[in-house]
Image (tube, rainbow, N blue to C red):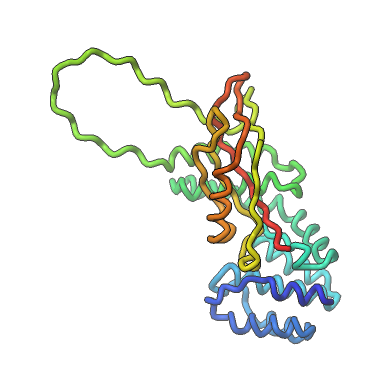
Amino acid sequence: MKWLMIAASLVVFSGQGPDTRSITAARELYASARYDEALAMLNGLRPSDASQPSDRKTIEQYRSLCLLALGRGDEAETAIAAVVTADPFYQPSEAEASPRVRATFFDVRQRLLPDLTTSRYAEAKQAYDRKQYAEAAARFRELVVLLDDPQMNGRQGDMRTLAAGFVELATVAATPPPAPKEEPKPEPPVPAKPARPAEPKIYTGEEPGIVAPVTVRQDIPPVPAAITAMARSQGILDLLIDEKGRLVSIVLRSSIHPTYDRMIVNAARDWKYKPATLDGTPVQFRKLVQVSVSKR
């Protein structure tokens, strides 16, 4: 059961909820292999009332580990389901759990993902309907990443098409209109100038005939050991690549850790791509990059 004790040291605590001391005490009981006592204390907490999402996830994580240690697999699956529901992107690493626990987590997550993507789509659409376009764009981007998860096995392809379309619509709608300009005073007429060319279209890969950029260099920096326990397993970068394959915009859409966020954005400035093409002509392209970090 040494792997169970390793996992105990890797869970992140918010330190802000009313149940933090109880969670810490349960962690210490669990680390001492006193699983019955740890489980009894965790069962006395109410995850739905915890003030932080990380507290809710922590409680269910420890409950699932205790239940598995006690051979109560069915109850452990229920606790794992609560963790997946709170954070569908979370998956325990090799350092956090044994192969048996990770296999159980894998099975539960694969079973729940279709329903979770459906509920995530509904939440994103509600934000869009409320005209909260920035929030809707972020939610739809995360949904696209979730739908592209290998455990989805290509399911709900129609939903992915809709979500990608809403990403573009919400992004455009979230852009504030330019400030009104004061009417200039009449001036003597001047010769007409040629019309400025239209701004180049930004493609996303959904358009017919588009060929996505080819990665030339995309080095991901390692997570510093000092923040490993506090970092999320995944993040999302929103990149704009111009017709010469240069990055002209880097936006972090899903944070991993403030320190590591700065590292990955700085690293992205050195990434290189062969530009996207439309019928052989280079074009601008918006690319979402999912950054998965190892906590080993």
Report the side of 253 relative to 102 (left or right): left
Residue nearest the observer in this picture, 187 or 108: 187
What residue appears at the point 69 percent right and 44 percent down from the top-left corner?
148
Residue extending farthest to the front is 270
What residue appears at the point 64 percent right and 60 percent down from the top-left corner?
223
Q: In the rendered view, tell whether residue 145 sits above or below residue 197.
A: below
Percent of width and height locating residue 270: 57, 43
What residue appears at the point 73 percent right and 83 percent down from the top-left corner?
38
Q: Is residue 268 visible?
A: yes
Report the side of 188 relative to 279 (left or right): left
Residue nearest the observer in this picture, 212 or 144: 212
Q: Is residue 88 visible?
A: no
What residue appears at the point 60 percent right and 22 percent down from the top-left corner?
278
Is the C terminus in the top left, top right, bottom left or bottom right quadrant? bottom right
Residue extending farthest to the top is 191
Percent of width and height locating residue 1: 84, 77
Kindly indicate the quadrant of the structure image that contains residue 224.
Answer: bottom right
Percent of width and height locating residue 147: 68, 45
Q: In the rendered view, tell whether residue 92 sits above or below residue 216.
A: below
Kindly indicate the quadrant of the structure image that contains residue 181.
Answer: top left
Percent of width and height locating residue 249: 50, 40
Q: In the rendered view, tell whether residue 177 sits above or below residue 47.
A: above
Report the side of 260 relative to 182 (left or right): right
How many numbered circles does the render carry?
Answer: 0
